[in-house]
Amino acid sequence: MKIVACINFVPDTETKVKVGSDGKTVDKTGVNFILNPYDEFAIEAALQLKEKNTGETMAISLGTDSHKEALRKALAMGIDKAVLLKDETARDSLSLARALADELKKISPDCITFGKQSIDYTGEQIPGLVAEFLGIPSVSAVVALNIQDGKVVCEREIEGGREVVETSLPVVISAQKGLNEPRYPTLKGIMASKSKPIEERVPGSFPPSLEVVAMQKPPGKQPGKIVGTDATSVKELVRLLHEEAKVI
């Protein structure tokens, strides 16, 4: 079985994000980048599938040289091979998904794992788009996974509960928190990852379908207002919610 984990390198959630001088991008000065947390579940899923079904695992990331840090962690966790689709340009979700799908077609994996979302833009679009471009099934928000004899059984998280989905290989899986408990890289794994090569490839060029014209931080939180302490204040509260807050 050939399993590929697609991973991303994103700003730490504790980072105070600032808009760049161009007003369109994030200022990366002083920003701490990490392996996308949801992608750790995708890596662990790939490793567990290999352990149960034998085969080979690979991690792929599209981005600059900085993405090698995320790939190194994947290797330290136990992934067999790593590929960087080196690209300095900004891509939207569609362009990124097309480039990943273009590369995955050459690899022909049995299972492709993603994190449910990337914590920088949280679009949750890439796994489904990649599956569509490859023409294979996709199951999102997976919290339980079993693959045996080519049959795929997933339990996925939905609003108000869970549902069980059955499909077949090849398949795209997007991992939700709860699917597994990602392993910590061992000292042996960390040392071994330093000697493992990261293959660099040139991704396909696909024009973006949208343009960022401006980026700005949300306005600061406004001070609260107390309109009263008893039932006589309800009428004024409703008026304020309607005329000022405009939420009703």
Image (cartoon, rainbow, N blue to C red):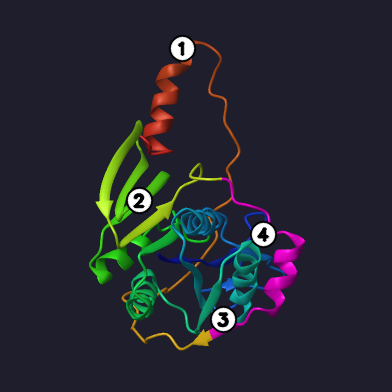
Q: Residue 155 carries which label?
A: none
Name which of mark 3 and mark 2 comes first in the sequence.
3
Q: How crowded is mark 2: few (under 14 residues within 10 Å), some or many (20 or more)?
A: few
Query: What's the amino acid at mark 3?
Result: Thr
Seen in the picture, residue 242 relative to 38 is either above or below; the reply is above
Instruction: Give the image location of residue 54, x and y in percent.
Output: 47, 61
Check disc 4: other Cα within 10 Å, few if <14, some if 14-19, many if 20+.
Answer: few
Q: Distance between the residues labelled 2 and 4?
A: 44 Å
User: At label 1, which amino acid type do we have?
Assistant: Thr
Q: Is residue 193 magenta?
A: yes
Which mark sits nearer the N-terminus, 2 or 4?
4
Q: Which amino acid type corresponds to the residue marked 2 in the rendered image? A: Gln
Q: Which of marks 3 and 2 is in front?
A: 2
Side of 35 relative to 49 (left or right): right
Q: Mark 2 points at which residue?
A: 148
On residue 232, which mark appears?
A: 1
Is disc 1 placed on a helix, strand or loop? Answer: helix
Residue at the disc numbered 3: 64
User: What range is drawn magenta here?
Assistant: 181-199
Which residue in the protein does label 4 denote?
A: 16
N-term mark: 3 or 1: 3
Of the image marks 1 and 2, the number of the one nearer the N terminus:
2
Q: From this viewpoint, which residue is outermost toward the left? A: 135
Q: Which of 83 and 242 is in front in this view?
A: 83
The Cα–Cα distance between marks 3 and 2, rounded to whole angstroms, is: 36 Å
Sequence-wise, the earlier of marks 3 and 4 is: 4
Q: Is residue 156 left or right of residue 191?
A: left
Whole-number angstrom distance, CA of label 1 to CA of label 2: 65 Å
